[in-house]
Amino acid sequence: MRAFVSILIPAYNAENWIADTLESAIAQTWPHKEIIVVDDGSTDGTLAIARRFERKGVRVITQLNQGAAAARNTASSLSRGDYIQWLDADDLLSPDKVAHQMEAAQQVRDRRALFSSPWAYFRYRPARAKFIPTPLCSDLDPTEWLTRKWEGNWHMQTATWLINRELTEAAGLWDTRLLGDDDGEYFARVINASTGIRFVPQSRVYYRITPSSRLSHIGRSNKKMEAQFLGMKLQIGYLRARDDSDRVRAACVNYLQTWLPNFYPNRPDLVQEAQQLAASLGGRLSLPKASWKYAWIEKLFGFAAAKHTQLSYNQIKSSALRAWDKMMYSVDHRSRSVS
């Protein structure tokens, strides 16, 4: 099988990571591939670093900053592959990730089949990543996959997927209105257009944990909150168009409940709209409450203060873990250099 695979990498201010990401793309054992980087108006050294890899066959394009979805659309429009492999500029692929999924594609011989793989978090040391199976780590039909995702608040990382060109074209472009979870909405359309998901356990993806300024972080941004809720409504619509059973409706309500703390108490209008949508699904949303560690702050100063304190604590904890892992990474690197 000589199918051509396009590895597409949108990049914005990723100078600390993009070299490692490109090395993992170049190292893919599947020989029939192209690698395209679209620099979305980075203000750091991302573009210069990416261009160093042009001598290794990487194609580098730059454009004015338009957002991740627009960069992905640009990359897709330039690609020639029979299959698409998306890869964020700070993540890594195992060397045979694409090859194993292409072997599965050869066995299935269905252009609407979609292929996923295991993934795990890491900060600086990918060898420390722990691959923990979830209910999404199996062969599933589209309705079952989407329902399970929301029932347990599971996630499948962007780079896990390998998508046939026909399926990509059926799903359409990335939605540039979405400022976060644009991958969730996009792959909901891809999954909806597929004949089913084939899980390939031998393929692996390493998902780097970066600071809270990452794309998926909503914070107090009104634009991100509005975009997030729009994406949620779209995804609920996709699933209900397939199946409007009691189980699916309950999964949609659970999805709304999971994300409600991102809107409460800053956006009462979105909270009310979410409550109305849940009611139309036969469910009811509970207003978020602080966990026991922050309950006293909520009692004295309100939920907003408790939420802010928890977010600040999580950011400090994440920074400390990142600093420790970076130090250990440096120690390991020096040890290998000496030996």
Image: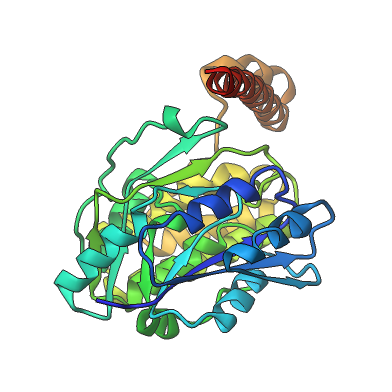
Q: Residue 255 vs residue 293: left or right?
A: left
Please tell me whether residue 78 is drawn above or below residue 36 in the rendered image: below
Question: What residue appears at the point 38 percent right and 67 percent down from the top-left corner?
Answer: 31
Residue 115 left/right relative to 8: left
- Please report the residue visible at 68 percent of the width from the left and 18 percent of the height from the top: 297
Q: Toward which corner of the image does residue 168 lie, by quadrant? A: bottom left
Q: Position of residue 115 (x, y in %)?
A: 30, 64
Check the image and name the residue furthest to the right.
Answer: 43
Camera-side residue: 93 or 193?
A: 93
Quadrant including the N terminus: bottom left
Say if residue 246 shows up in the picture.
no
Q: Quadrant of residue 78?
A: bottom right
The residue positioned 54% from the left and 51% from the top of the image is 23
Give the residue at the far left of this rendering: 107
Give how far across and how far down residue 154 sits, in percent: 37, 46
Q: Is residue 202 above or below residue 8?
A: above
